[in-house]
Image: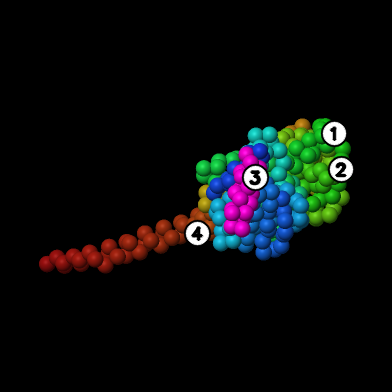
Amino acid sequence: MSDEVKTTNNSSSEDFKKLLDVNDFKIPQVGDLVKGKVITASKAEVKLDIGGFITGVVRGPELYEEDDDYADLQSGDDVEATVIDAENENGELELSFRFAGQEKAWSGLRKAFSNREILKVKVADANKGGLLVKYRQIAGFLPVSQLAPENYPRVNGGDKGKILEKLKSFAGKEFEAKVMTLEEREDKIIFSEKEAWNEKQKDVIQKYKVGTAVEGNITAITDFGVFVSFGDNMEGLIHISELAWQRIDDPADLFKVGDKVKAEVISVENGKIFLSAKKLIHDPWTDVDKKYKTGQIVDGTILKVNPFGLFVKLDDDIHGLAHISQIALGPKERIHDIYKAKDVVKFEIVSIEPKEHRLGLTVAADKAKKQAEPAKEVKEEKEKKTKDEPSSAEATDDKKSKAKKETKEKAEKKPAKKAKK
């Protein structure tokens, strides 16, 4: 009986050996990447059939759902895993999806970087500089400057607290991005959502040539201009200097988010579209000479006081500048002490340049005041001098009285002569 068992065992062993030789199957070693077929899968573990000869198991922290290849596995699915132990307590291969997934992730990053392909990254957190993102389980960074137009945090005044709040609101979201920098040794990976957006919008952007008129809604207002959404998910910037023909201090004074505006494309650079609203508005400077002439005295409202002069509103369309040299300040006078915003002052127009949209002013009232003050001081000085000086008659009487007084004093001081004997 024992001989029969021995014979049977030897036969099975030889058959197994022959089977291994036929299939060229090698016993996996620690660190090897193996392919297997899912036998069973649960949240706790996944068992794999490796080549029909060995069973492998993936347990606990070695399970990996960040990669779609390892999420929602079903019986019969083919999958790769990394050997972390050649034999566990149950005689099975101890496997890891995490290591295999990481290698696949790096491989995907290298390929995407080389071919300029678009990847999906998930936002984990944010700081003042941008978003902390992950490609599968590999961490990277997406700077604020590399966000797509629709996600760029445009905050009026550049409030850093509000910008950070906006960035943190993206936590948990997935963005499409390109790899800008890939340095494996330093674990430095920089992503750009803007480049991916430009890639997708490239054909659409080409439709918008300089001079094209567009209509859209204001999506954000900043201190340097307004952003307008138009067409097929396109966005352009109207710089503050292109909002209107007159000078504007704060775009928020004229516009609000949601306003509909018309504009003209004036430039397309690196996927960015720049617009002008004033191009579609009549230029009031073309007929400024019908309203104003050099030498004309006008009432102007001071809009802003600067060290170099006064910005002045003559009407809703025409604004001018009274340069500091045209204000005639006194030696100890300062422009901010004498003039304030919203003051209405009389100005004289000294120059008009329609092509350059410039109009020069001098302060007429101040000029008259400066000229009048010296004349007034001279007159008052003369009056004071005249008042203090005696008349000619009074002066003559004073002289006579003084001479008589002096003669009397001399006589009193002279000694009397002695009588002759």
Amino acid at pointer 2? Gly
For label 4, the residue is 388
Residue labelled with disc 2: 231
**Marks 4 and 1, how far apart in space?**
88 Å
Task: Residue 293: tell me if it is visible.
Answer: no
Q: Is residue 7 shown in magenta?
A: yes
Residue 90: in sight, yes or no? yes
Q: CA distance from mark 4 to mark 3?
A: 142 Å
Range drawn in magenta: 1-21
Residue drawn where x is 50% and y is 59% of the image: 388
Find residue 293 and report its horizontal and vertical position in percent. Answer: 79, 37
Would residue 153 appear left or right of 256 to someone viewing this image?
Answer: left
- For residue 366, above or below residue 110: below
Q: Earlier in the sequence, mark 1 or mark 2?
A: 1
Give the mark nearest the N terminus, 4 or 3.
3
Marks 1,2: beta carbons within 8 A:
yes
The picture quadrant where one finds residue 232 is: top right
